[in-house]
Image (cartoon, rainbow, N blue to C red):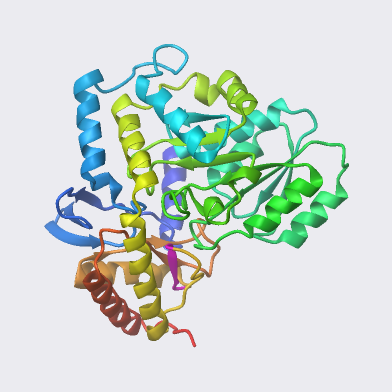
């Protein structure tokens, strides 16, 4: 069998398991949010999108669009170089300064992607600190897992959000060895918050560095929208905070806010940072505009949380099961890969509602789900339309209800 035939056979098996990923070709409109035009063989149709990470609809906001246009006209598009050569623009420097000040850290460092931020930061720290032990939540982002897995550090995985298990692992190890605890504030597939304060207290007790991924909560929680740690008043007790601009802030790129020695080590030694072309200056300008806007305005996040409350009430009333009700991410549990895809297709065809199905291996087999993520662009009328459509789809596919 040829190499290509081997790949074809594996793809066929993936399709039989209901794990093959289909992609819609969407044309999102800055004037028609949260709608998009789907382009396909059958022509065009207008869809209401319920699975976007553009939680605050900032990618469409005039502040972001105007900042991007102004920067393009001022400095052009790409930086065409790594940060160390010619890739550090005035916007990069200003955004890093704004991040450090907002988070109360000595410095901040930008990356082209959120994945790159986690991968580069964790792998570099893990290789640079002799004898380091890294403790990682089992449901951490793939970017965190890859950064830790391929490093020289010893790795220990604790059960998801299980503080007692984490404590037992910490107690088993030499108290003199350096330690780092890597975890998220909000887990993107289950929509649940971490026991943040408990983990921080463990880190302090055992002298471990704390590394917190806030990428799905930044922009939404806290008085200034800095994330779940700000909401709990814990920013000053966390050593390294990672976030990004590709979700709530409607732009692209990742960042860490940390002590100076951490950012200097990573920008000096991380190959993924040193040898990567930096983010285009207009994209950084857009991120800067969005970040500063959300520090001063809470209109988008207040409306989003109001929409979320409405939607949660409706889902409870209909008996639609959720993996978690903690946050603005609402994973609707289906529990079967084929029915999950059929349900998504039914909503698309019958109601012009787009919700992407999430199947294994992204989530454990048997917990397949629709990852529902309203945005601040949705209205209360949109919520009622979505609830009615989901209720009919649930009934049509004879799915189990909660309660």
Q: Nearer the viewer, residue 383 or 257?
A: 257
- Residue 339 lies, with reference to residue 249, above or below; the image says below
Q: Is residue 329 magenta?
A: yes
Q: Is residue 15 magenta?
A: no
- Residue 234 lies, with reference to residue 388, above or below; the image says above
For this orientation, the residue located farthest to the left is 43
x%, y% of residue 130?
78, 28
x%, y% of residue 118?
55, 38
**Range shown magenta:** 328-334
Q: Is residue 294 left or right of residue 178?
A: left
Q: Which residue is at a point 41% across and 49% down the rendered structure image?
A: 219
Residue 383 figure quarter: bottom left
What is the number of callouts on the image? Answer: 0
- Residue 192 lies, with reference to residue 170, above or below; the image says below
Q: Is residue 173 left or right of residue 6?
A: right
Q: Which residue is at a point 37% across and 52% down the rendered structure image?
A: 53
């Amino acid at each position: 069998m040829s190499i290509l035939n081997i790949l074809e056979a594996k793809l066929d098996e993936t399709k039989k398991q209901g794990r093959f990923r289909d992609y819609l070709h969407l044309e999102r409109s800055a004037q028609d949010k949260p709608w998009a035009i789907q382009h396909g063989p059958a022509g065009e149709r207008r869809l209401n999108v319920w699975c976007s990470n553009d939680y605050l609809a900032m990618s469409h906001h005039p502040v972001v669009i105007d900042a991007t246009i102004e920067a393009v006209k001022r400095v052009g598009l790409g930086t065409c170089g790594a940060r160390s050569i010619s890739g550090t623009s005035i916007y990069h420097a200003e955004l890093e300064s704004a991040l450090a000040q907002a988070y109360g850290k000595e410095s901040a460092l930008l990356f082209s992607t959120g994945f790159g931020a986690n991968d580069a930061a964790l792998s570099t720290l893990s290789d640079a600190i002799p004898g380091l032990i890294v403790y990682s939540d089992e449901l951490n982002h793939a970017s965190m897992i890859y950064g830790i897995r391929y490093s020289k550090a010893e790795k220990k995985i604790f059960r998801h959000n299980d503080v007692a298990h984490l404590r037992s692992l910490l107690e088993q190890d030499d108290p003199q060895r350096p330690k780092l605890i890597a975890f998220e504030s909000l887990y993107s597939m289950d929509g649940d918050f971490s026991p943040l304060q408990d983990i921080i207290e463990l880190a302090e007790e055992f002298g471990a560095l704390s590394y917190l991924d806030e990428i799905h909560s930044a922009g939404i929680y806290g008085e200034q929208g800095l994330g779940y740690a700000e909401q709990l008043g814990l920013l000053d007790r966390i050593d390294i905070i990672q976030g990004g601009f590709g979700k709530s802030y409607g732009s692209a790129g990742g960042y860490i806010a940390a002590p100076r020695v951490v950012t200097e080590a990573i920008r000096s030694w991380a190959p993924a940072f040193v040898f990567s072309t930096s983010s285009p200056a207009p994209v950084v300008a857009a991120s800067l505009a969005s970040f500063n806007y959300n520090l001063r305005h809470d209109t988008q996040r207040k409306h989003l949380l109001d929409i979320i409350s409405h939607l949660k009430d409706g889902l409870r009333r209909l008996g639609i099961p959720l993996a978690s009700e903690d946050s603005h991410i609402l994973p609707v549990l289906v529990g079967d890969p084929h029915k999950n895809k059929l349900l998504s297709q039914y909503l698309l065809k019958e109601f012009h509602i787009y919700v992407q199905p999430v199947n294994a291996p992204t989530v454990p087999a048997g917990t397949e789900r629709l990852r529902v993520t309203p945005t601040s662009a949705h209205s209360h009328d949109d919520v009622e339309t979505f609830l009615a459509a989901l209720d009919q789809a649930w009934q049509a596919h004879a799915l189990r209800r909660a309660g």
